[in-house]
Amino acid sequence: MTRTRLATVLTLSFVLLSSYSLRADVRSDQKAHVQFAGMLGRMFNMFGGKAARAKGGTTISIALKGDRKATTTDNTEQIIDLGEEKIYDIDLKKKSYTVTTFAELRRRTC
């Protein structure tokens, strides 16, 4: 039963996120690529992972709508909702999510 509920929540989250970025007030796509030369560059490319070897680098999409901000990368998405004072972190590979309230963040920093 919990597996079905989790699948339903994740599916609804993906649907909301995909439609959220289309109806956003402001949308921005950012592309980053870092390249090191010489021996350090070779070591970084060997151990740096997929992002280090990619020709195009990594792409980050940011969408703003009202009091919500959605940040999307290849593997993760994050929604910050100021009205509800919550942060939703979604891991697309593991198909899981976490919800953090602003109160929890304040307790962590103190």
Image (spheres, rainbow, N blue to C red):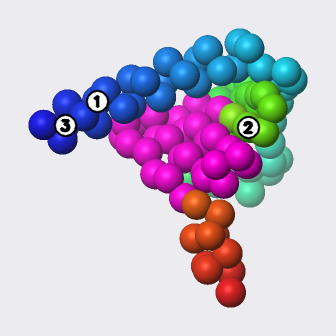
Secondary structure under badge 3?
Answer: helix
- Kindly report the distance in space between the C-alpha atoms of the residues bearing marks 1 and 3: 6 Å
Q: Which residues are magenta?
A: 72-100
Instruction: Name the residue type under label 1.
Output: Ala
Q: Nearer the viewer, residue 47 or 25?
A: 25
| Residue 49 circle label | none
| Residue at x 57%, y 70% (from the top left corner) | 104
List the single residue furthest toward the front.
83
Three-letter code for the amino acid on which mark 2 is drawn: Arg
Q: Residue furthest left?
A: 1
Q: Is residue 74 visible?
A: yes
Measure the C-alpha gap from mark 2 to mark 3: 28 Å
For the residues bearing labels 1 and 3, Cβ distance under 8 angstroms: yes
Residue annotated with mark 3:
3
Establish if 24 lies above or below 106. Answer: above
Residue occupied by mark 2: 68
Q: Considering only vertical position in the picture, is 107 above or below 90?
A: below
Query: What residue does disc 1 label?
Result: 7
Distance between mark 2 and mark 1 Cα atoms: 24 Å
Q: Residue 35: which quarter of the image?
A: top right
Q: Amino acid at mark 3?
A: Arg
Residue 101, position as x, y percentages in the image: 58, 60
